[in-house]
Structures are given as C-alpha cells and as structure tokens.
Image (spheres, rainbow, N blue to C red):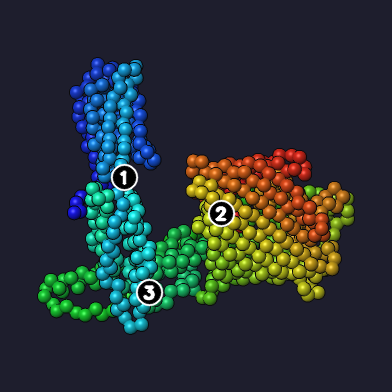
Amino acid sequence: MFLARPTISAAQARRTRILAQIAVIVFALPATGAACAQAIDYSVQIDAPGRLDDLLEDNLDLVRWRGNPRLDLEQLQRLVKDAPEQARTLIATEGYYSPKVSAGLDTSSAVPVARVIVDPGPPVLVGDVDLILRGFEPLSQGSKPFDQATLYRSWTLGVGEQFRQADWEAAKRNLLRQVMQTRYPRAQLVETSATVDPDALRALLRVVVDSGPEIRLGELRIEGLKRYPRHIITNLNQIKPGAEYSEAALQSFQARLQDTGYFSTVEVSTDMAAALDDNIDELKAEQQGAPEAAPSGPQTLPVVVRVNENKQRNASVGIGYSTNTGARAQVNYDDLNVRGLRLKSQVIAETKRQAARADFYFPTTARGYNDSFGAGFERNDLRGEITNVATVAVRRAWGTPLLERSLTFEYLSEKQTVEGQLSRNSKSLPLTYSITKRQLDNLIQPTRGYVVNAQLGGALLPVLTDERFVRAYTRFVNYRPISVDSTLILRGEAGALGSKEKDGVPSTFLFRAGGDQSVRGYGYQELGVRENDAVVGGRYLLTGGVEYQYWFKPPWGVAVFVDAGNAADRIEDLKPEFGYGIGARWRSPVGPINVDLAYGQAIKEARLHFSVGFTF
C-alpha cells in the first residue's frame, strides 16, 4: 500500500529554517549585556555521505548560528536538540525518507563540539511516471499531430532514478518548456503529484499537461520605429503569416534585428494579451449559458516587434594594450543613416600597427544578403618589415552566426620595405570566398563543439595585378569536455599560396605565425621567412596546439598547453617551432580572459600573452 506523503519543497525547507531562526531569536531576546558576555564559541562536525555533508553544512541552524554573540550554552543545546529533525527535513529533499540522525554536544574541551551523524539509508527511487497530455489535437486541416513520443522521451526523471526534490522540479519545468517552444506557448501543468512510500522506497509521479490553444503567427506589427525606414525590419522577417508558433523563430528574428546595430533593445514576441481576451470572452459566454461552440481552429496572433532606436551618430574613444601589437588608442565614429546606408569608421594607432577604415553597409535584403563597400589604409612595422597597404573593397555576406559566408572583391596597393633592401610596390585585384561554421554550446563561453573557417581566393586576371595567385587557408578550434571541471582544446591552421613568383603578391596574402592566437612563446608574427635581419611572410603555413583547462573554482581556471608551427616558402622547410606553458583563465561576462606564460623553445625565452574573449 502506498502512503501519500507530501514531498518537501525548497520553499518548505526555507520556512523550516526561518521558524527555527525565529525561535532562537525569541529565546535570545531576554539576553542582556551580561548574557552577551557569556557568548559561547563552538565547532560543528557533520558526518554525512556525499552531497548531504554540504547540504547540512549550508543549511543547518547549528552551523548558521556559529559566531552569534548572543548565543549561550543553553541556546546551543536547544539547537543541537533540534538538529536531527531539521536534518531529516533537508535530507528528504535528496530522496532519503528514512534516515537515522543523531546529534550531541561534547563539552569536555575548552571549545564545545557539536556532532551530527547521519545514516541516510537507502534512497527512494522513481517507481512509475504517469504523463498525461490533454489537448494537442490538430485543429486545422493539414496540421501535423503533436510529436508526443518525443515529449515523453524528454522527461528527465525516469523510472529507477533517485527521487530528489530538485530533479523533480527541474523535470516538470523542462517538460513544460519543451511544450511551450512550439505551437502551444500557453500550455500549463494542471496537475502534478509525487506519492512517496518510504517503506517500499518508491515514488509514483503524475503530471498532467494541458496544451491550451494552438497558436499561429500572423501579421507583423512594429512599435518604436521613428528614425529609420521600416524595411530594415521587414527585410529580416522570415516568418510567414500562418506559420506555427515557434519560439526559436522569434528569437532568431530578434537576434537578426539586434545585430543590425540600429537598435539598443529589441523584443520580438506575440500578442498574448489578445489570446487572453478571446479566452475571457469565451468564458463569459459559457457562464451566461451560451451553447458551447466547436473548436474553430488555431488562434492567430500578430508578431510584435518593439524596438528602441540607437542614436543616429555615435563617437567613442578607447585605449588599450595588446601583447601582440603593443599600446593602442582608438577612435570610432558611426552614423546609422547616411543616405539610407550605415557608416562604420575607425582610426587605430598601435605601437606596431596604424590603421584607418570606413565602410558603408546597405540594409539587409529580403533574401538575407548584407552588402557593403569601403576603403582603408594600414601600416605595419613587424620584425624588420614595414608595409603600407591601401584597399578598396566591396563585400557580400550572408548566413547565420552558425554558418556565415562572404564574398569579397578588393583592390590592394602595397608598399613593402624590408630592412637592408629596396622598397617594393605591388598591386592586386583578388576575389575571396570565406565560410565559417560554428557548432558550439555557447558562442561567448564555449566548452563543447567546434568552429572551422575556410577561405579560397586569388587574383586570376592580369588586370591591376602584378602577380597572379591562388590562396587557400583554413583554421579550426575544437572543444572537448573531459569531465565536468575540465576541457581539452585542439587548435590548428594551415595555408598555401600558389603563384609563379612570390614578388608582386601583397604581403597581406602571405603567411606568418606566432602570437596570442597562434604559436605562444613567440612574438606576434615572429615565425616566417628570414630575409637579412627581417622576418617576412611565406607561401605555406602550418600550426597546431593542444590545451588542457581545469576549472578548479568556476569561473576561475588554469591551463597547460603546447603549441607548434611555422611558415616557410617551401613545404619541406616547414620545421615546427615549439612553445609551451601555463595560463590562468577567468570566465568574464564578455568572454574568457586568458593570461599565459609561454616558453619559446627556439628562442629560449619566456613571453607573457594576454587575450580577452573568444575570437575566431
């Protein structure tokens, strides 16, 4: 026979603690200054297996009241006496309903010791799960039945698993969340119960889910748009009127709008208030005795876009430091409406690099294309090589953050000065295709998955080009969890340039290695082809690295790593140079902050590397 016993919720556990604390306060109220002088110091020893030790350590009043100046010996004895019952209440939330708990106070030493000993006994296991779905019938012709089998499989607290209160609550939340994501956003848990039989060590679970009305997405309504044209929003809307409700589709639409830069905040939702009004009207009709009408079909709700516009013009300045290129000062100027285009411009002055660039972006087209054009100038002074490059480019980008693609057509004019040689000028008109695929659990703080980028391009026509060439490049990062607290990261990159002559190919399209995001232990682009006392780019590139991260106290972690690689003009000269070291990690709100101390084996020197965020 099953005994119906209410489960202990987190709220009930908190109320138990609060009542115990109030009792202690009440007993302590008569305390005077003299009583305060008799405050007692004591220690607590808890003998409980597994996670129960931490649970009691964090929640027992016997522990929480340590150090209270108004607690005397009599009140301490009362806390010790109450500890077993409070411990049983707490332990029940972990699925142990028949524990043996004892508590005592040892006053033989100068500092009394309160001991709590717990034998939790066998845990209660889930004996049966009864999931009942109400509603979920397709109401319109052509609608597909709801995938109930997948919903059943998504239940996370299965038969035979230990019945923990936190897992029970999480399973119910996850189930409802699964339903609400598509077609039935107004689904509700109309009944939930857990019947526990401590003698049989079984818990019978029952959950009843009501789907509520099926929701379809309708017309687009825009609120808050004043300064910018309407097509900035409508061109990005991929939701067709009559489509089934999809939370993922709404969030994707919202992310695309946020990425435009036109808005400080964006909210994309459905007008649930309209659906509630319809339900209230139906309820009133039923109460007034009106005949019950047959279901008329899914409810269609408008897609509402609420935006707060960014300022049309914005200027910002900043300073910083990079272990790659030194101290940095930067000025940005953006204008979101220059004859219907968006302007982004910046001037950067770094120790080893100076650059200025301005780009104009067209509003995203209805087919999802992001077109832009711009011009820039960049000067680099690296390892005895000075380059001055002027560029004019047009670009088309499309896709999603998970799969980005772009096509860039540009004109480059470069002046290269290598220490001990005459300056060389080159020009080129290349076309480059780039694709980036991301499969990560988190785009800002990844711990699992991979990112890979591949580029293929070249200047194939003898037009505004000194030396025709073809160039291929690829790079990847792979995150592999080893345990809950550790991750293995694999990195690699490779590149190759094909041309009749190397001279005449702008150095932008050649390869070098070394630095924060390459082979650590070496300076930024320190590895390459030697020309006199300078290091210049080579035709080929191959690098790789292995890093092990251990998060000993999240968000803090440590890392050990080995990197290797080089760049050369011949494949047989790609002799890898090794760097290895240790690092500190912190998961900040803007992404991981990495501080590495790496030793370059070839140069026999240690170098500090610092980087912020996950960049790829």
Identify the residue shown where x is 78% and y is 75%. 461
The amino acid pointed to by label 1 is Pro
Provide the secondary structure element on which disc 2 rests: strand
| Horizontal side, residue 267 vs residue 99: left or right | right
User: Which badge, 1 or 2, is on the more N-terminal residue?
Assistant: 1
User: Which badge, 3 or 2, is on the more N-terminal residue?
Assistant: 3
Q: Is residue 423 above or below residue 104?
A: below
| Horizontal side, residue 463 vs residue 18: left or right | right
User: Which badge, 3 or 1, is on the more N-terminal residue?
Assistant: 1
Rendered location of residue 456, percent (x, y): 70, 68
Q: Residues within 10 Å of mark 1 (few under 14, many from 20)?
A: some
**Marks 1, 2: nearer the viewer:** 1
Residue of label 3: 244
Residue of label 1: 122
**Residue 457 or residue 15, whichever sits in front:** 15
Whether tag 3 and tag 1 are in contact, CB under 8 A, the answer is no
Rendered location of residue 580, percent (x, y): 68, 44
Q: Quadrant of residue 223?
A: bottom left
Q: Is residue 455 above or below residue 140?
A: above
